[in-house]
């Protein structure tokens, strides 16, 4: 009898966790782009009424993006096996790749104006 040796092709990461975390991050960035665009468009009307739409952006845009990103990073860290340095490297690498893809997709989805819309209120001529 031979003893079963561990396979050298055994993965130290979870493909399902990477796919689900990446999809969640990309969707969160696209949602953020939609909320940012809406806030940018409505800020002038809000200022004319004596209020601001920035609270809407924080609650419905920034908070979900931060929560989804933190959850995805935690999920990636928890589902990666092996020594701690390798776990962190793989998880952070997958997280950064998904974030870069999310930013690019959200930027394209916004008509390449995502970063111009960060200057909320500069389009108002009151």
Image: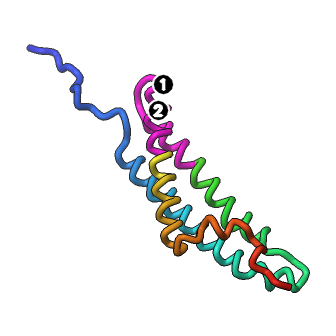
Residue ID at (78%, 69%) = 54
Left or right relative to 59: residue 98: left
Q: Is residue 7 magenta?
A: no
- Residue receiving disc 2: 89
Left or right? Give the position of 27 relative to 3: right
Secondary structure type for disc 2: helix
Q: Is residue 4 left or right of residue 53?
A: left
Using the image as rendered, state which of residue 75 and residue 57 is in the foreground. Answer: 57
Mark 1 Cα-neighbour bin, 10 Å: few <14, some 14–19, many ≥20? few
The image shows residue 101 at horizontal and vertical percentages of 46, 56
Q: Is residue 90 magenta?
A: yes
Query: Which disc is residue 85 wearing?
Result: 1
Instruction: Please provide the residue range marked out in magenta.
Output: 71-95
Q: Secondary structure at mark 1?
A: helix
* 117 shown above or below 21: below
Q: Is residue 108 above or below residue 45?
A: above
**x, y percent for residue 64:** 64, 60
Task: Residue at 26%, 31% (x, y): give it.
Answer: 10
Q: Residue at x 66, y 70 (%)?
A: 117
Q: Quadrant of the N terminus?
A: top left
């Amino acid at each position: 009898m031979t003893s079963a040796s561990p396979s050298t092709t055994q993965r130290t990461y979870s493909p399902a966790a990477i796919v689900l975390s990446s999809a969640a991050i990309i969707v969160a960035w696209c949602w953020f782009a939609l909320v940012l665009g809406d806030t940018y468009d409505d800020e002038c009307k809000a200022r004319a009424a004596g209020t601001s739409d920035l609270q809407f952006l924080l609650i419905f845009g920034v908070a979900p993006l931060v929560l989804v990103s933190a959850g995805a990073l935690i999920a990636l860290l928890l589902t990666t096996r092996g020594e701690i340095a390798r776990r962190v490297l793989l998880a952070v690498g997958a997280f950064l790749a998904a974030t870069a893809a999310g930013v690019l997709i959200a930027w394209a989805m916004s008509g390449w104006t995502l970063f111009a819309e960060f200057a909320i209120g500069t389009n108002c001529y009151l």
